[in-house]
Image (tube, rainbow, N blue to C red):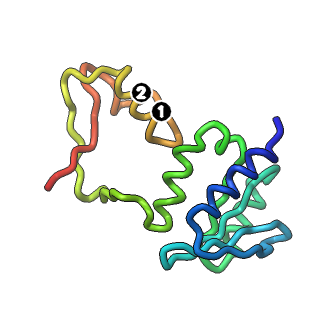
Amino acid sequence: SDVRPARDCFDEFLHSFADTWNDDICEGRSVQVVHANGREVAIHWADGLLPGLAEAMTVAWPRRLVHIWPDLWLARGMLLQSVVLSMFGLHSRLIFARKTVARRLLGIDRAIGEQFMEANHLLRARNGRPMVGSGCRVLVLED
């Protein structure tokens, strides 16, 4: 597949909220250092990146470095946009895990749980204990 249009789309997304950005190099690869909302995150378009080099880049970079793989951007772009915006504190609603509890809700079947996981989690739905049985475990905000 042609990842250049995806890269152009990703760059447009970054520039839509960034206060400033500049290009830098890490381990021989181009990295965009993005500043927004008083925060700085280095973002690397990981086209053709091998896992060993991804780890080396992450260790070598002195601050936060995030790799964006083109296939994940193409498949889950809206969710990745949400994740990136959260890194810059640009999400309107933030819920900390410590303010949630896991509960089994009767009446929510496996299909509904899988739909939620597909829509809201990068790793998508997986078979496992939290979704086994007559209900689905969900996180509920505790006030």
Q: Position of residue 73 (x, y in %)?
A: 65, 45
Distance between mark 1 and mark 2 Cα atoms? 6 Å
Along the viewing direction, whichever of 61 and 116 lies nearer the viewer: 116
- Kind of residue sitting beneath label 1: Glu
- The image quarter containing residue 45 is bottom right
Above or below, 50 relative to 15: above
Q: Quadrant of residue 110?
A: top left
What SS does tag 1 mark? helix
Task: Categorize mark 1 by other alpha carbons within 10 Å: few (<14), some (14-19), many (20+).
Answer: some
Which circle marks residue 118 in the picture? 1
Residue drawn at (48%, 74%), measured in percent from left and top? Answer: 37
Q: Residue furthest left?
A: 143
Determine whether 126 is above or below 94 in the image: above
Q: Name, please, the residue furthest toward the right.
A: 28
Secondary structure beneath dot 2 equals: helix
Residue 93 placement, left or right of 3: left
Determine the image quadrant of residue 99.
bottom left
* Image location (x, y in percent) of residue 55: 70, 62
Q: Nearer the viewer, residue 125 or 84?
A: 84
Residue depicted at x 49% and y 52% = 82
Residue picked out by circle 2 = 114
Residue at x 41%, y 27% (from the top left corner): 114
Image spot of residue 29 (x, y percent): 82, 66
- The disc at residue 137 is none
| Above or below: residue 39 compared with residue 48 | below
Q: Residue at x 45, y 27 (%)?
A: 127
Q: Are marks 1 and 2 in contact (CB under 8 Å)?
A: yes
